[in-house]
Amino acid sequence: MIIAIDGPSGSGKSTLGRMLARELHLLYIDTGSMYRAVALAVMEAHLDPADTEAVAALAARIDIDLEGDPDSLKVLLENRDVTEEIRTEGVTAMSSVVSTNPGVRRAMVERQRQMGQRGAVLNGRDIGTVVFPEADIKFFLTASPKERAERRFHEDRLTNTNVSFEQTLTEMTERDRRDSTRADSPLKVAEDAIVIDSSALSIEQVLARMMEHVHRHH
Ligand code: DC
């Protein structure tokens, strides 16, 4: 079974994706972490992100692996554990830039299809539209920008006490804009996706709704 979960940042994709994968004993693939690993590699190689050919060539060449269960997923870049590093602000911003590069996307999509072919919960922006258009179930999670920024702010504050809510909201809005307006595989709702707005729902309530759809599908 292949379950696609798409949506903007802060919509609960990773929390719910993990829970669903655990519940259903499926592999969990966080595709955003792959774009983040590419971004880190680009920064470390001191490439100009505007040099699309060099960036795409790097993305096609580097080794990116996801390892472990949904709750302790490790991201490996050339066999080096970069799980923490890819969550820094700089990498977050760069990942939204490199993910507009069609060559980067082609390389990642190919790997995601290979990794997921035997069944998985995949989350990202283009899973139901591009990576697995034939997915068994497609969810599109969303929430109001304010709610999403608030969630991200509380998360970020655990590691960075200097960050302000306004800054989180501004950066998130800019990334949403870039993710939704890019020419190649922009974030959009697949025609056959189940849209869940979690603004006024608890995590448990969202999970219950998703599980209802999964059971109905069987
Ligand atoms: O979900 P995330 O914040 O970890 O994703 C990081 C960036 O990668 C984000 O700007 C959107 C992009 N991305 C994408 O373009 N396609 C995906 N399938 C997943 C993430």
Image (cartoon, grey):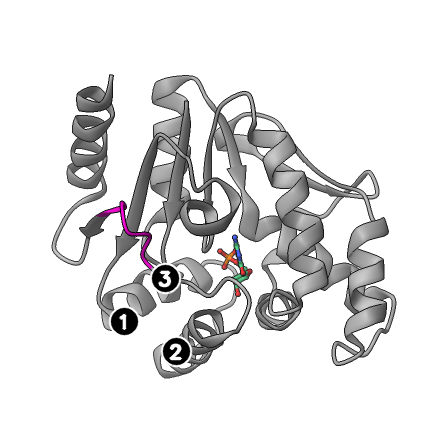
Q: Position of residue 195 (x, y in %)?
A: 22, 50
Depth-wise, is mark 3 or mark 1 nearer the camera? 3
> Mark 3: which amino acid?
Lys
Q: Residue at x 40, y 82 (%)?
A: 170
89 with respect to 193 (left or right): right
User: Which one is in front, 106 or 154?
Assistant: 106
Q: Residue at x 80, y 52 (%)?
A: 60
Q: Residue at x 55, y 20 (%)?
A: 118
**Residue position for label 1:** 145
- The answer to whether residue 85 shows anywhere in this view is no
Q: Is mark 2 within 8 Å of ligand 1?
A: no
32 is higher (above) or lower (below) than 15:
below
Residue stretch rendered in magenta on the structure = 189-194
> Mark 2: which amino acid?
Thr
**Residue position for label 2:** 173
114 with respect to 117 (left or right): right
> Mark 1: which amino acid?
Pro
Query: Helix, strand or loop at disc 1?
Result: helix
Contact flag, marks 3 and 2 (Cβ < 8 Å): no
Q: Position of residue 99 (x, y in %)?
A: 61, 64
Contact flag, marks 1 and 2 (Cβ < 8 Å): yes
**Residue position for label 3:** 188
